């Protein structure tokens, strides 16, 4: 269960990879996710909250993501993670990223500032008391800002089965390409805000590294609401040991009506 929160973060930003020109979110938007291991054991929960503020005089969105293990799992493997991103309200490009995690005693405390004109990332590893400067790709995104950037910059109206999206990401002092494949449209039943609902969704497959965590590169499948919000609803993951499922449990502050199917 060491990678529970990392898997959820992957779920959150990849699930929102296509959207319309009209902004898909606003200040006050909030999501809460629950996770279960091998179909029955509650593994953890996480939240994402959107705020507005200024960063070095520029208007930005400040998003805070928190995650932790819950239930029986926390007694033998405790996780407490916090991710933050400050990104431009117009361009969606990040200015600052914070990762402060404790996963079973494995800790990180890193702050990254981005210079998009020079294509540089200034990394401050507080735990190791080490600072470094790393060259980045054009229009680089951090792990959190990508979630919101993609929601506002991709259109699903003409998406076809088999289409791919790629994005330049920066994480753990590295540049890496992100790739997502569209699998089709599907209607699912789920429960959010305590109500059982039916929703039209977009189904995707993010490509991940096979190895210690995932069985193979195509181990993840996720479902996103096919409306203007592009709400992440569900993910299933085949792990090297067992399986993991994440579900949106609660939400508030959506910019657009949540489109549900009523029989």
Image: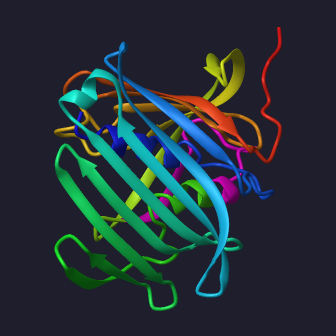
**Residue plotted at (16% across, 39% down):** 212
* 116 versus 216 height, above or below: below
Residue 54 falls inside the magenta stretch: no
Residue 115 appears in view: yes
* 10 versus 56 height, above or below: above
Residue 163 falls inside the magenta stretch: yes
Q: Residue furthest top?
A: 263
Q: Point out residue 140 in the picture as x, y percentages from the top left corner.
A: 47, 72
User: What range of the chain is rendered magenta?
Assistant: 151-170
Quarter of the view holding residue 198 = top right
Q: Point out residue 114 in the picture as x, y percentages from the top left corner.
A: 45, 80
Q: Point out residue 48 in the picture as x, y percentages from the top left corner.
A: 55, 48
Quarter of the view holding residue 108 = bottom left
Q: Point out residue 193 in the picture as x, y percentages from the top left corner.
A: 67, 25
Residue 208 appears in view: no
> Relative to the observer, which residue lies in front, 24 or 57?
57
> Relative to the observer, which residue lies in front, 181 or 42?
42
**Residue plotted at (36% across, 29% down):** 237
* 56 versus 149 height, above or below: below
Q: How many marks?
A: 0
**Residue plotted at (20% across, 34% down):** 77
Horizontal relation, residue 83 to residue 18: left or right: left
């Amino acid at each position: 269960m060491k990678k529970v929160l990392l898997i959820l973060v992957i779920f959150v930003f990849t699930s929102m990879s296509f959207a319309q020109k009209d902004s898909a979110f606003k200040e006050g938007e909030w999501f809460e996710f629950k996770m279960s291991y091998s179909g029955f054991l509650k593994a953890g929960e996480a939240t994402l909250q959107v705020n507005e503020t200024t960063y070095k005089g520029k208007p930005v969105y400040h998003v805070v993501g928190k995650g932790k293990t819950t239930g029986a799992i926390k007694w033998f493997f405790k996780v407490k993670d916090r991710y933050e991103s400050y990104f431009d309200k117009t361009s969606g490009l990040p200015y600052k990223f914070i990762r402060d995690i404790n996963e079973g005693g494995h800790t990180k405390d890193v702050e990254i500032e981005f210079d998009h004109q020079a294509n540089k990332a200034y990394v401050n590893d507080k735990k190791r008391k080490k600072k470094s400067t790393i060259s980045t790709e054009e229009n680089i995104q951090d792990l959190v800002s990508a979630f919101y950037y993609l929601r506002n910059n991709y259109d699903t109206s003409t998406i076809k089965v088999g289409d791919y999206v790629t994005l330049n990401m920066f994480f753990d002092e590295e540049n890496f390409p992100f790739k997502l494949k569209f699998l089709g449209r599907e209607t699912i039943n789920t429960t959010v805000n305590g109500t059982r609902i039916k929703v039209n969704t977009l189904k995707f497959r993010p490509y991940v590294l096979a190895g210690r965590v995932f069985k193979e590169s195509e181990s993840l499948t996720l479902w996103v609401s096919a409306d203007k919000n592009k709400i992440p609803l569900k993910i299933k993951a085949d792990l090297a040991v067992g399986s993991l499922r994440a579900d949106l449990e609660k939400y508030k502050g959506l910019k657009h009506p949540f489109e549900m199917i009523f029989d």
